[in-house]
Every structure is written in structure tokens, then in C-alpha cells.
Image: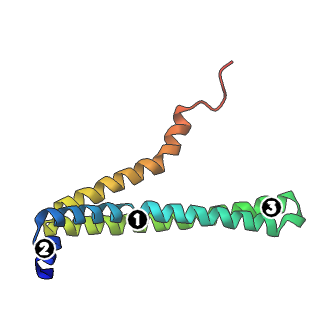
Amino acid sequence: MSSQLNTFNDPAQNPSLQYKGSALQGVLIGLIPLGLLLLIVAVTVLLTALARQLVASSGFFAQQQASLIVLVAGLAVALVVYIIAIVRTLRSVTAWQRGGAGGQARAALLALGFTALVVLLPVVLMIVLPQNPAP
């Protein structure tokens, strides 16, 4: 009886289960760059707050310099990690396409497209929304 249950739940035996699992895996792999970017942004914000508190007694200009240094370093780290994650994800997509896992590759590319949209959304909002309200 248990071998019969394993046959029904085994993705190798049921192609529809294999496609769903691989598409989900593709989406998760495609969202890794966004997750890493969000993690680095959160750590950078926390380190900026910590740096400001550490130099609080030195005055405003010291706080400003400490914040700027931490934010620039965080931006550089985020940029490098984001580019590396996108390149690795695209290499996985290429391998999946060559291996015949088209559904998994499409799901990962759609997730990468969503990641690009989330990253570019603040820039688009800055362009579209006016900075100064009209009189």
C-alpha cells in the first residue's frame, strides 16, 4: 500500500507534479536576487542607524559622514551581490533550457522580470510624480 502511495506522489512518475515543482523551483531561484537585495538594504539601514548612534556625541557633521560612508559601502555591496546573483540565475536558466526544462526556465525569467520591476519602480515613480506640487 505504501509503495502505491509513493507512486502517486513521485514527481518522476507523474509529469504534472514534476512541472509544478520545477516551475515553483524556477520562481524561487528567480527571486533570489531580490531577496539578497532586500537583505542587504535592511542590513545597510541597520548599520547606518548604528553608525549614527556611535558618533552621536561628535556632532552632526560626523553623523553625516558616518551615514554616508555606510550607505555608499552598502550600495556598492548591494550592486556587486545583485549582479552576481543575476548572472548565476541566468546561467541556471540557460542550463535548464538546454536540459529541456522550459517551464522552470520560463518561471525563473518571469521572476527575474518581477525583480527588475521592483528595483526600477522607485526610479519610475521619481520620474512620474512631481517633486514640487503645482500652485
Q: Where is residue 12? Give x, y as percent.
A: 13, 73
Which of the labelled discs sits on residue 63, or is there none? Answer: 3
Three-letter amino acid code at the position of disc 2: Ala
Residue occupied by mark 1: 32
Q: Residue at x 41, y 51 (%)?
A: 116
Marks 3 and 1, Cα distance to the nearest angstrom?
33 Å
Depth check, mark 1 against mark 2: the one in front is: 2
In this rendering, position of residue 30 left or right of residue 5: right
Q: Earlier in the sequence, mark 1 or mark 2?
A: 2
Which image quarter holds the C terminus? top right
Residue occupied by mark 2: 12
Mark 2 residue crowding within 10 angstroms, few (<14) / some (14–19) / many (20+): few
Depth check, mark 3 against mark 2: the one in front is: 2
For residue 134, above or below residue 50? above
Q: Which one is nearer the viewer's eye here, 18 or 37?
A: 18
Three-letter amino acid code at the position of disc 1: Ile
